[in-house]
Amino acid sequence: MGQASHRWRALGEGAPSVVVGIEVLLVQAGFAVPVRTAIGTHRSRPLVFVRVVTDGAEGWGECAALADDTYDVEDAAGAFRVLTTAGVPRLTAHLGTVGGRLPTPGRCAAVLREGGCGPLASATVEMAVGDAHLRAAGQSFASLVAGKTGKSGASPPVPVGGVLGMSTDVGELLEAADRLVAEGVSRLKVKIAPGRDVEPLAALRDRYPDLALQGDANGSYVGDPAGPPRALDELDLACIEQPLGVGDLDGHARLAASRSTPICLDESLHSAATVRQALALGACSVVCVKPARLGGIGQALEACEIATEQGAPLWIGGMFESGYGRAANAAIATGPGRWLPGDLGRPSGYLARFVTEDPVYVRGGNGGIPAQGGPLQLVVPTGPGLGRAPDTAGLRPWCRERRWFAVR
């Protein structure tokens, strides 16, 4: 069967699907509450979707880009512009040379790279193309990840971690943590920065001595050669995420060698190759998997395979996705590896508008059967495709811009 990354990239080889058209939508979902990090406060949440319509099915992709470029060089408005002026026109031009036949996700990614499309924008189209192939074949994404010969089949639900924004009030932080723990999260991740690190994490550790806990610095210690305070090593953290700058793998390696707390990288990992490089250098011992940042689902699956080969724990990072994107990420976490609880909480808990449906969540139980109490888990979709497709009619009231590209 080969590895999952190979199976994904080869989806649809020899398939007769012909593309009718491609739609790009910019939707304003909004945040229910602003999210504060070390590098800025996110107040708006636009979402970019790509819909690939074929003669037998349609596939959806969701862009992870945020409202501004404080976290990544690609923002949502820029991704929409690149997709509508370069990425999708280039793909439709390619389709014109092959009789409109839907390419494999691997070929689609190559066409977009050749056109200079950024990784987040490219990942959106690759996702839509793969989803269309899966739906045409009646196959679930989870079954592809697992290498099952059947087209569907249940996968175990995956544990859910919670995310806490940076707060200047420890009491408020603890109240927010209490709400997440009451929901059943198996891990708490809190945004930290110089001067706002030891106190909030120590308070959380005192409140929850046995819960998995980690700090996410978003590169905020870039100007401090000593890095995060050594006092954090006394708090039994699962990891400290991205303490230094994006390109500073050597600095992360030196920091990792001097601390007992594992270092996890996120922003520094922009491809499967950089995951391999970071692990080889000792720049991290825990890997955050964000499919869009890594360049798409194919790159993400390959990154998982590299981390698993080297015995590095890994977890799914979040980009405040809709329910559709969140369900797709959950399926990746059903693959082999030492998986930690990921950023897979309910989208309706942070998005202001119900632009897509939440995936199904359960508390504990056996095989996804709900139980009283127990850890919160996300049920991995078993139907065709990456997850429950967005409802086009439901998106339109919040749609700021849309473009349709007919394929002739």
Image (cartoon, rainbow, N blue to C red):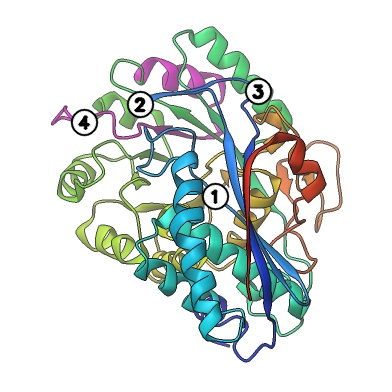
Q: Position of residue 131 (x, y in %)?
A: 66, 67
Give the residue drawn at x 63%, y 47%. 402
**The C terminus - image quarter:** bottom right
**Residue 265 appears in the picture as rendered:** yes
User: Mark 1 is on which residue type?
Assistant: Cys
Q: Disc 2 or 1, which lies upstream in sequence? A: 2
Alpha-carbon span between mark 1 and mark 3? 19 Å
Work out whether residue 8 or residue 154 is closer to the camera in this orientation and state it.
8
Label 1 or label 4, whichever lies nearer to me, is 1
What is the crowding at mark 1: few (fewer than 14 residues within 10 Å), some, or many (at least 20)? many
Left or right of 223, for residue 24: right
User: Mark 4 is on which residue type?
Assistant: Gly
Give the residue drawn at x 36%, y 46%. 264
Q: Position of residue 167 (x, y in %)?
A: 47, 14
The residue where tag 4 is placed is 227
Q: Which residues are magenta?
A: 198-227
Q: Disc 3 or 4, which lies upstream in sequence? A: 3
User: Mark 3 is on which residue type?
Assistant: Ala
User: Mark 2 is on which residue type?
Assistant: Ile
The residue where tag 3 is placed is 32
Question: Is-magenta flag for residue 315?
Answer: no
